[in-house]
Image: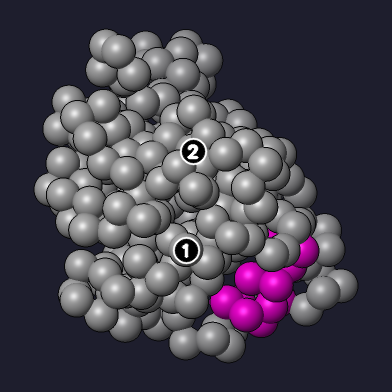
Amino acid sequence: MSYLDKIRAANTHDLASFLPFSVSGIRVGCVKHAFAEILARWPEVLRVDERGVTLAASLDSGDMPAAERTLAVSEVMQRLRDEGHIDGWRDELYPVNRAWSESPYLLIERAAVPLLGVRAYGVHMNGFVRGADGLKMWIARRSLSKPTGPGKLDQMVAGGQPADIGVYDNMLKECAEEAGIPRDIAHHVRAVGAITYALETSVGFRPDLIFNFDLELPADFSPVNTDGEVDAFCLWPMEQVMETVRDSDAFKFNCALVIIDFLVRHGYIAADDPDYSDIIEGLMGKPQLPTGW
């Protein structure tokens, strides 16, 4: 396998089996045909036809407050949860928009995001230690109780990006909860960019964006999980990190992409690598839209 194989696997999709999901005439997601048929049971909230899924006319006007849309759609999502159509309910609200800088059209439950094919956001932090023998990276093993990727390897700190907190503040919160990093260390975390991918899953579509951070840690610091979401931490030399990402599926798929981005930025993947330009472009994966969307 190669790093490029990992990137391509995270961007596998065929949206011909989906319908576009739009709000106020703006496409914000996409829905599998089978799930669209289920949504059609609530015509007072969602309108479904051969052209796509939209909000009902009473909710779709441009001046409709996001809070009213949120309430109406939330009631449908809760019914779907109770019927077993939505797994892993989080009680976290995510924005429905096309970019983090946009005001959301509405907010939806995190577990419903891939079912509606809207963009989710996350924050991931590469924690590393610099020594005489080079860099080492702290790796987390996800708890077996996690609803996604149980037992997979992960960044030292990573989490979803809800609508009610800023990106930097969320990163600091996750540092404390997931790795017990004190604020006087965590505030040195650096924003270093973002990656995107576009992955079709068994339930829907994930056109997600992850905000990437780096944090150089003191050699005598050891992380301690405080929220039950991490089973263990280990400090690996970069050669072991690189080999594991490249040659196995031990890492959660999007965490592997975050590490590949780190490898590019820190010179572990050289500019003369035959895949270099494809890797860089691939880390900003975009949906391949059907004609007419």
Q: Main secondary structure of the magenta part?
A: helix
Where is residue 19 shown, x and y percent of the image? 25, 33
Give the labeled residue for mark 1: 72
Residue 116 within the segment the image draws in magenta: no
Element under label 1?
helix
Where is residue 212 shown, x and y percent of the image? 61, 46
Up/down of 19 relative to 201, above or below? above
Residue 180 within the segment the image draws in magenta: yes
The magenta span reads 169-181
- Work out which quarter of the rendered image holds the C terminus and state it: top left
Q: Please tell me which of labels 2 and 1 falls first in the chain.
A: 2
Residue at x-position 16% and y-position 41%: 33
Residue 70, quarter of picture = bottom right
Q: Answer few, some or many: residues within 10 Å of disc 1's Cα (few below 14, many 20 plus, some between 14 and 19).
A: some
The colouring scheme, among rainbow, by chain, secondary structure or one colour, is: one colour
- Work out which quarter of the rendered image holds the N terminus and state it: top left
Give the labeled residue for mark 2: 23
Residue at x-position 30% and y-position 13%: 292
Residue at x-position 62% and y-position 80%: 177
Residue at x-position 67% and y-position 41%: 63
Element under label 2?
strand
